[in-house]
Amino acid sequence: MLNAELNTPDGAGSQRGDNEYHPDVSALPSFPPADSTYGNRAKSHDDAYVQMEDGDDNDNNGRPMMGGYAQSIASSVMTAEGLADPTGFWIICSVVLIGDMNRGVLFPIMWPLVQELGGNSVWLGYAVGAFSFGRIIASPSLGRWSIEKGYSTTLITTTTIMLFGCIMFAQVYRVGSLYFLIATQILLGVGSGTLGVTRAYVAEITATRQRTTYIAWLTAVQYGGFTVTPIFGALFSYLLEDKRYNVGFFVFDQYSAAAYFMASLCVVALFLLLTGFQARYRTKPSAKAKKSKSRLEQDEVANRMTFLGITVYNAALLGCMLLNVSTKGSIGSFETMGISFAESHFGLQPALAGTIVSINGLIGVGCLLSMGYLGRLLTDIQMIIGGIAVCAIGIISFASLESVEMGAENSIVHYIIGIFMIYGIGYPIGHTAVIGLFSKVVGRRPQGTLQGWFASAGSLARILFPVMSGYIAQYDDITTVFIVLFVVLVISNIFVAMSAKTLEALSV
């Protein structure tokens, strides 16, 4: 039992009165359990990470605190911008942007490239899923590594891997092998498998009350990476279509130019990490920390057992991961089938379809940058339910369409509105609220490993859903994919509605 007696000689639990012991949920094993959470290195250097403690209702002398936040948060952690390290935050944003640009910039050329190499929609599903496979095998280890080795070492290593992956992708058309394409996609996925690391970093330099806002900003950068930047891939495809330029060893065509462009951005990211990013390590919390009454009540809820045989806390983490799977999987299916669907049902060229996705992705970025305002009007639960509902409606709107080959004349306006509901409103708001909720449920526990598993859950969805979509489209019909996605999202919303009260209690 996860809420069994805890031996805490170092005072990890909290006490009230002389003999009554209250287990501290932050001392519970992580889900899945992590072997280690804190390193033993000295933290006395100037750029060492200053631990952010959870705010309590009273200070050490029993005096009430404003808003339930301890003075240490206001003075030692928060800056005028609400960040402990603004420079580090923006460098982290650049790393996230480049990581997801590897998927976004290559989005418009992936389907034509697979066709050139002799593949079909099934191979397209494998190619898209391979990127996420790289992420899923790397994310948990990178999350743990960020705790043990530090953020700087982890990010420099992965960005270097990403650089080599871009150079290899530029050779895919030259090699002429679908298997080589899959291998390069896996390598790119490993290199960009730091979503958990970057989210953990942001969680640790922000206060809980502002975390959703800054997580939303980080997600806006990530979302812009794979939804706005397809316009670059579309531009390379348009300018270099049926053209080929040899410059020594390098060959520039509509496929390799995008990869070399991404390689140059990886070099920029490495420069920023090496020159401007400060190494930070998480320090061990103080042995004894007084806890407010509300925090004790939250721990009591978290330690209750569910019918699954796990605590409410672990069940909430698992539920958030499943929500990550359903939302990420849905957008992953569109990432896989979007270009071929636009061609087959609307007669759109890849460049135009990629441009429409990019414009709506830009609108989605705007929504994400407004999450701070939305957060004052709506709770995370309300944003999750609303975002998923809008996304589901946009998806099911395509289910009744027939292909151009069947004589259908589907309006491009329908395509634009549907993509707007999915990319412009539904997914960015709903999915970002899921990320914020998960981070709040985790709280001030070491977030690296848990965020790594959360990112892996999303990457797993980006493997399973694209492959599933490819098979369904190949052997049945692409509109069947939309029905399946709609059902998955409806079930997700039912789960959120039924669990709303518990999730809100754990995310305070």
Image: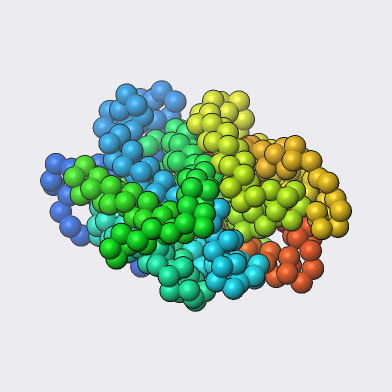
Q: Position of residue 483 (x, y in %)?
A: 79, 56
Instruction: Please state which of residues 290 and 129 is positioned toward the viewer in this rendering.
Output: 129
Which residue appears at 41% of the width and 55% of the height?
257
Which residue appears at 13% of the width and 46% of the height?
45
Q: Position of residue 340 (x, y in %)?
A: 67, 57
Q: Residue furthest left?
A: 45
On screen, 264 above or below 211?
A: below
For the rendered model, the colour scheme is rainbow
On screen, 4 above or below 412?
A: below
Q: How many marks?
A: 0
Q: Position of residue 206 (x, y in %)?
A: 37, 37
Is residue 282 among what the camera can see?
Answer: no
**490 left or right of 106?**
right
Residue 383: quadrant of the picture: top right
Which residue appears at 67% of the width and 42% of the height?
419
Is residue 218 among what the camera can see?
Answer: yes
Residue 504: quadrant of the picture: top right
On screen, 4 above or below 264?
A: below
Which residue appears at 30% of the width and 34% of the height?
86
**36 left or right of 469?**
left
Instruction: Please state which of residues 352 and 281 is positioned toward the viewer in this rendering.
Output: 352
Q: Position of residue 432 (x, y in %)?
A: 55, 42
